[in-house]
Image: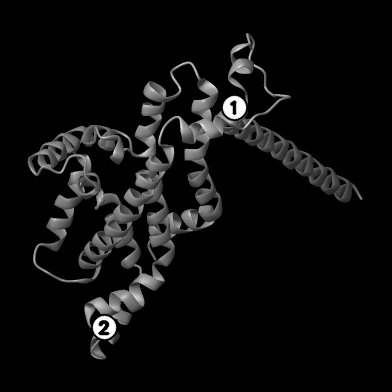
Amino acid sequence: MDNRVDYAKIEKTAKIRRTVINVVTYTFLALWAVMVLFPFYWMLLTSVKSYSAYNSEYIPKFFTLSPTLKNYVDAFTAVPLARYFANTVLFTVLTTAIMLVVITLAAFAFARLEFRGKNIAFLIFLSLMMIPNELVIITNFVTITDWNMRNTFPGLILPSVTSVFYIYLLKENFEQIPDSLYYAAKVDGTSDIRYLLKVMIPISKPTLITITILKVIECWNSYVWPRLITDDENYYLVSNGIQEIRENGFGRENIPAMMAAVVVISVPLIVLFLIFRKKIMAGVSRGGTKG
């Protein structure tokens, strides 16, 4: 009888402990979510406030009773935001497509083909990740300028068509595919390119989707290189267009209109991430697991 009472007390204590831990954990996660999401809420809230209402708030308000969409209309009329948007879509699509071809072929060569000095070459290749981005930007700027490719889409795209990290991630994923499949395909007379297209790419689809999404986000948020290589607004991207909006569009004081432009620019990436968030996590997890 005493043993039963003790067991019940232990079980009750463990249950209370789990409940307390869950309450503390979810409370912390809720507070963290509020901290992360609040800037987005504030951006959206400010974008629907009128210019006069925003400037009349000596103490910022966390809501508005008279929302307006005028700021969104101004975002497309005061500056050529639609052109910046189209330029960014073109830049993102072309850069991502070319990069996928480059890194897939490179990862396949390092993961499956046998050639002299492969391991040394890959180590040297990985060492490129140690070079500061500032040095790479300077070198790329001099090269693109010497080739008279400033204020052109090829000048924007070429320096971004490869990535050491993505090649490494995809190579690790390719190496998880059993060698027996490759040898069986070679016995059947399958070429390397056909094996890559029919076997390796379909198996590695989650990782490729992850790389694609991450590259799209990287291209969409690109700022330093486009700002450095273009001074013609016909080639501005949305990230550079924000600066143009601030300087020559709404003015530095029209914060609501600027927030409306930022919302328009940010929404595609947010939607993209929400749709493919599970595939991103699955691809990264699969690419980093050997087995």
Relative side of 5 to 95, left or right: right
- Classify mark 1: helix, strand or loop: helix
Q: Is residue 211 above or below residue 250?
A: below
User: Which residue is located at x 27 percent, y 37 percent?
Assistant: 226
Choose between 62 and 204: the one closer to the eye. 62
The percent position of residue 25, horizontal first and vertical second, equals 66, 37
Q: Is residue 89 above or below residue 45?
A: below
Q: Is residue 189 above or below residue 111?
A: below
Residue that numbered label 2 is attached to: 183
Q: How many marks?
A: 2
Kindly give the residue lying farthest to the bottom in the view shown: 188
The answer to whether residue 177 of the structure is visible from this angle is no
The answer to whether residue 75 of the structure is visible from this angle is yes
Q: Amino acid at mark 1?
A: Trp
CA distance for labels 1 and 2: 57 Å
Residue that numbered label 1 is attached to: 42
Choose between 155 and 99: the one closer to the eye. 155
